[in-house]
Image: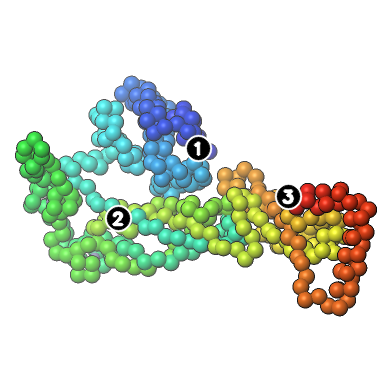
Amino acid sequence: MSKRDYYEVLGVARDASESAIKGAYRKKALKYHPDRNPGDAAAEEHFKEASEAYEVLSDPEKKAAYDRYGHAGIEGNFGRGGFQWSDFTHAGDFQDIFGDIFESFFGGRRSRGGAVKPKGRDLKIKVALTLEEIATGAKKNIALTRLQRCKSCDGTGAASGTGRKACSTCGGQGQVQQMARTLFGPSMTVVTCPACEGEGHIVANPCPECRGEGRERGQTTLTVHIPAGVQEGNYIPLRGQGEVGPRGGAAGDCLVFITEKEHDYFTRDGDHVIYQLPLGFAQAALGAEVEVPTLSGKALLKVPAGTQSGRVFRMGGRGIPDVNGRGVGDQLVEVVLWTPEGLSRRERELFAELAELEKVRVAKEGESFFAKVCKAFGS
Ligand SMILES: [Zn+2]
Ligand SMILES: [Zn+2]
């Protein structure tokens, strides 16, 4: 089943502001709320669909990936079964809407006070691509070192056969009250428990391999599929491929940033590529069929007689595909007249003869000849 466009789901324009997106989601959530539509499975589906759309469009990184690559850009965000309620991170922002159904949707994910598991770090890596790879899209294997689940304790941090015990500092709540000095005098605030880092429990007997961290440095190779048409600064998010959190905490993401390798003879201008073609006087004057390189191999270009230096020929469809699948750029071939040096005797004779003929032509055509030359060189 093909997925609906997220903007369409929320009924907002693609350039809608953050607050407009939030407002649109609130409206949909209220309309399809299960309490207002008891037993209506379609309404609940709408509620979930809108929540998924909001989850993506409210996050600048996910939104950017979705804007560029559509649903494919955020595929890795959710598990195998697609978006689940446990992926929804905004329930707290809409407490008035979610309040009482929180438990049933989120399966008691936060039922034990404020205890949470710290998430692992995101990783940022760079991958350099040639223009040829950018034109076709590429599959790259990237070797990297990251913190991974400790194999000895399977990420629990506990030595084999031992378990965890409730944190005595916070009584398993993951949070403690603390007196803080504020401008208005001392005040009680709730902070993450320093003893268990918010987890609510601690490892009784730490695993000797990871010293109770539940993770260890290790090497891995990730495969990233890069669509055609990307450019410097774009990135592909690999969800859950960053570093794992301590003691079984969720993994961060790995963001693969694109860099462009400099090309020997092409320069890029958006989806177009520019090539400078050196042409001899005789070829330019008489016309010629020349071989030019393109991103997909060699091609023949017909240069008509009387071609001036600086003239640009357009080879349609020989550029880079648009990253959103809207057409393909062109190759622009700019003629650069090549002036011979170190002339042989014979060449010198021929050029001298040509020079004589030019004199005659100037005498005959006078002003108009210079006007033509000036026009050709744009001065
Ligand atoms: Zn371990
Ligand atoms: Zn604690």
Q: Is residue 11 above or below residue 168?
A: above
> Dot 3: what SS?
loop
Mark identifier at residue 379: 3
Residue appearing at x 86%, y 49% in the figure: 367
Q: Residue 288's x, y, as percent?
A: 84, 61
Give the amino acid type for the residue marked by disc 2 in the picture. Answer: Gly
Q: To which residue does mark 1 refer?
A: 3
Q: Is residue 111 above or below residue 130?
A: above
Q: Residue 235's x, y, as percent?
A: 46, 52
Separation of residues labelled 3 and 2 (CA atoms): 62 Å
Q: Is residue 146 above or below residue 107?
A: below
Q: Residue 22's x, y, as percent?
A: 37, 31
Give the image quarter of residue 266: bottom right
- Quarter of the render that holds ligand 1: bottom left
* Circle 2 crowding by C-alpha within 10 Å: few under 14, some 14–19, many from 20: many
Please state which of residues 291 and 210 is positioned toward the viewer in this rendering.
291
The residue lying furthest to the top in this view is: 36
Mark identifier at residue 120: 2
> Dot 1: what SS?
loop
The first of marks 3 and 1 along the sequence is 1
Asked if one can make out residue 289 in the rendered structure from this viewpoint, the answer is: no
> Dot 2: what SS?
loop
Residue appearing at x 85%, y 64% in the figure: 282
Separation of residues labelled 1 and 2 (CA atoms): 30 Å
Please state which of residues 264 and 96 is positioned toward the viewer in this rendering.
264
Q: Are marks 1 and 2 in contact (CB under 8 Å)?
A: no
Separation of residues labelled 3 and 1 (CA atoms): 57 Å
